[in-house]
């Protein structure tokens, strides 16, 4: 009898849980099973085919870290603005576009004068400076003109304003510079590689990764080891309490947009040097992917945005070969955007707080 009673209680508990299942629960579990099945089937199929060698997988990984570091820089702007204002700034990708587009003219002038070939590092730094100044100025102007009047407004008005600002910036640059694609000049070491432990790494990838890591480290230091950074973290915890403690909230918000705009400017130049082109709509796709990275890491968490960007970049480059090629889909690399959007939807459904959001919430509580 003692052995039967626990077994009966277990069955009762199981039936009680099954009885509480709703149609939405069934759909979510079906989606979980389907995602796991696709991942397992694709991975097994790719391994059995043996189409890719170790060098190719390393190429996928390095490029994933490269593009992921750019996503991480853009995602930091999303997560910082959300942390202070609880606003999803959908115009942030267009800040990146504005900086990269403006820096194109500086890069083209340096290339025509031969300065880019003779002195590539100073030329790249000057190009970054132009991009940072323009993207930061547009970010601050956007906050002052478009976002500040809606700071204490509830509802969808701030979100609709952000979308409107995005369209406004895009169409402004389209009207000023046309809808054609402009080609960024090649860096003199483009195509060169450095051999590390027997593996060849492109110098451009190392430049992008190194520059992104340096800029993110500087941002992390500013936020955690300066007075304004302390004020930003205080405002992200509770804006009203921070104001009562004497913190100038307006100054904090402006500084937040300055930091986010600067990161977007740096990311825009790296993105343009990597893909060799700029156009008025170029900020939309990396902006949405950076938002997915911020959600994946836990929006409002700086380390989460960084790690989320890297994970998304790696998934985007490794995923098509690992998953889609294994199940026989044609042209799997054209579906890499599908991975980013699938990750965004999956995180919003199954783990809305992201990888680090739940931990952050518990610490605040």
Image: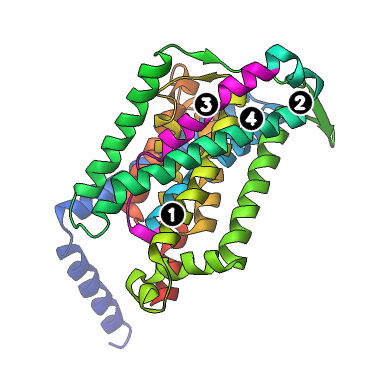
How far separated are the C-alphas under marks 3 and 4? 9 Å
| Label of residue 254 in the image | 1
Q: Secondary structure at mark 3?
A: helix
Q: Are marks 4 and 2 in contact (CB under 8 Å)?
A: no
| Label of residue 93 in the image | none
For label 2, count other residues whose C-alpha is less than 10 Å away and answer few (under 14), some (14-19) or many (20+). Answer: some
- Disc 3: which residue: 102
Q: Is residue 243 visible?
A: yes
Q: Is residue 67 left or right of residue 250?
A: right
- Whether 2 is drawn above or below 241: the answer is below
Q: Are marks 3 and 2 in contact (CB under 8 Å)?
A: no
Name the image quarter holding the C terminus: bottom left
Q: Position of residue 334 (x, y in %)?
A: 46, 21
How far separated are the C-alphas under marks 4 and 2? 10 Å
For label 4, count other residues whose C-alpha is less than 10 Å away and answer few (under 14), some (14-19) or many (20+). Answer: many
- Disc 2: which residue: 120
Q: Position of residue 40 (x, y in %)?
A: 47, 39
Mark in the foreground, 1 or 2: 1
Residue range (magenta): 83-110
How far separated are the C-alphas under marks 4 and 1? 24 Å
For label 1, count other residues whose C-alpha is less than 10 Å away and answer few (under 14), some (14-19) or many (20+). Answer: some
Q: Earlier in the sequence, mark 4 or mark 2?
A: 2
Q: Secondary structure at mark 2?
A: helix
Asked if the magenta segment contains residue 361, the reply would be no
Q: Quadrant of residue 194?
A: top right
- Disc 4: which residue: 127
Q: Earlier in the sequence, mark 1 or mark 2?
A: 2
Q: Secondary structure at mark 1?
A: helix
């Amino acid at each position: 009898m003692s052995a039967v009673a626990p077994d009966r209680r277990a069955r009762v508990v199981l039936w009680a849980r099954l009885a509480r299942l709703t149609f939405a629960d069934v759909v979510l579990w079906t989606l979980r099973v389907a995602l796991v099945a696709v991942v397992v089937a694709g991975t097994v199929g790719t391994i059995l085919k043996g189409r890719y060698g170790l060098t190719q997988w390393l190429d996928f990984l390095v490029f994933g870290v490269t593009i992921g570091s750019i996503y991480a820089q853009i995602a930091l702007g999303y997560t910082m603005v959300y942390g202070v204002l609880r606003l999803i700034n959908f115009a942030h990708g267009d800040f990146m576009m504005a900086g990269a587009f403006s820096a194109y003219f500086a890069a083209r002038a340096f290339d025509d004068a031969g300065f880019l070939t003779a002195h590539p590092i100073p030329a790249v730094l000057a190009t970054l400076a132009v991009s940072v100044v323009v993207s930061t100025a547009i970010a601050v102007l956007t906050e002052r003109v478009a976002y500040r009047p809606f700071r204490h407004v509830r509802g969808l008005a701030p979100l609709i304003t952000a979308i409107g600002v995005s369209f406004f910036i895009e169409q402004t640059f389209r009207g000023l510079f046309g809808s054609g694609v402009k080609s960024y000049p090649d860096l003199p070491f483009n195509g060169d590689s450095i051999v590390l432990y027997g593996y060849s790494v492109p110098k451009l990838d190392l430049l992008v990764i190194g520059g992104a890591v340096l800029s993110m480290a500087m941002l992390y230091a500013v936020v955690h080891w300066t007075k304004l950074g302390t004020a930003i973290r205080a405002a992200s915890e509770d804006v009203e309490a921070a104001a009562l403690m004497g913190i100038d909230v307006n100054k904090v918000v402006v500084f937040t947009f300055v930091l986010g705009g600067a990161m977007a400017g740096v990311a825009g130049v790296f993105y343009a040097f990597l893909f060799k082109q700029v156009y008025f709509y170029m900020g939309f796709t990396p902006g949405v992917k950076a938002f997915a990275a911020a959600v994946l890491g836990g929006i409002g968490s700086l380390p989460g945005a960084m790690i989320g960007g890297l994970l998304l970049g790696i998934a985007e480059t490794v995923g098509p070969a690992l998953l889609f090629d294994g199940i026989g889909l044609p042209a799997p690399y054209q579906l890499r955007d599908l991975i980013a959007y699938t990750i965004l939807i999956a995180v919003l459904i199954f783990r809305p707080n992201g990888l680090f959001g739940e931990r952050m919430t518990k610490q605040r509580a």
